[in-house]
Image: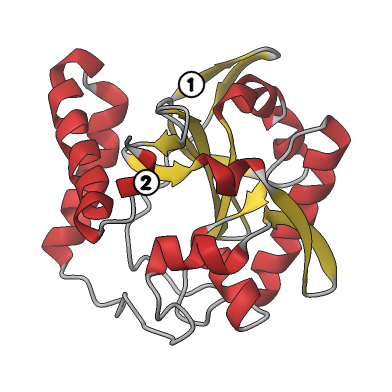
Amino acid sequence: MPRIKTPKGTYKYKLVPIYPGWKLIDKEKAFENLCLFKEIADRNGFNFFLAYGTLLGAAREKDFITHDEDIDLGADFKDVSLFLSMLFEFRENGFEVARWDDRGLISVIRNNEYIDIYFFTDYNDKLLINCGEPLPRKFFDNQANMEFKGVEFSAPADIDGVLEYWYGKDWRTPAQWLDYQAPKWRIWVFKVMQWVKLFIPKFLIKNLFKKKEQEMFNKYLKRGVLDEYLD
């Protein structure tokens, strides 16, 4: 059984293999989870912000995106220890860890709906990074409250700017990127990779991680959105 060392002891959990196209989001349950997550985070002084598809839906649809599958949140890598210390409290409230990557990604699941938390760390003085995905520091450092379904959450103050950075100038036009019909072999590969990351010594797959991270970084490089941040 996988384990996480936390400031409050060892947390044991059962891996839940998560792969793109796993399931469609249940909006009601997802929002219930998000609000409960916020309550626990606020009690412990853990700061997070709406990110990726969750921010896109909040800004464009004023709701979760119908064809999305999870909740995406961002946080500071410096707060990883604080978050891990909260895991037992999350468990008391029905959440369980579904996956954990000490490079800066953890997923918690409740009522079959999961939340991804991406912890960003320094890349240079203008960029942060998470598992190869860069984020301009200006979006991270400048946050403001936004109302989402009647509740206030933190988000990058320049919502238009960060969504254009992530999704391009046409971010206001809905585009479904998953058809939820992934072939069985691809699902099997995703599941195996998550188990591999747990049990194979990290030095054996370090180069594979580096390659995947560079591929992710290169996607942004090719779009030209990193030019002003790599001086």
Q: What x and y, as percent, mark residue 70?
A: 51, 62
Compared with residue 64, is residue 143 higher up or lower down, i.e. above or below? above
Q: What x and y, as percent, mark residue 145?
A: 79, 58
Badge 2 local density, few (<14 within 10 Å), some, or many (20+)?
few
What residue is drawn where x is 64% and y is 40%?
A: 141
The reply to whether discs 1 and 2 touch (Cβ–Cβ < 8 Å) is no
C-alpha separation, residue under disc 1 versus residue under disc 2? 41 Å
The image quadrant that residue 135 belongs to is: top left
Tag 2: residue type? Glu
What residue is drawn where x is 87% and y is 36%?
A: 43
Question: As drawn, is 24 to the left or to the right of 92?
Answer: left
Farthest bottom residue in view: 173
Quadrant in the picture for the N terminus:
top left
Observer able to see residue 26: no
Q: How many marks?
A: 2
Badge 1 local density, few (<14 within 10 Å), some, or many (20+)?
few
Question: As drawn, is 22 to the left or to the right of 66?
Answer: left
Observer able to see residue 204: yes
Q: Secondary structure at mark 1?
A: strand
Residue where numbered disc 1 is placed: 3
Q: What x and y, as percent, mark residue 12?
A: 54, 25
Question: As drawn, is 158 to the left or to the right of 70?
Answer: right
Q: What x and y, as percent, mark residue 73?
A: 59, 50
Residue 229 disc label: none
Residue where numbered disc 2 is placed: 228
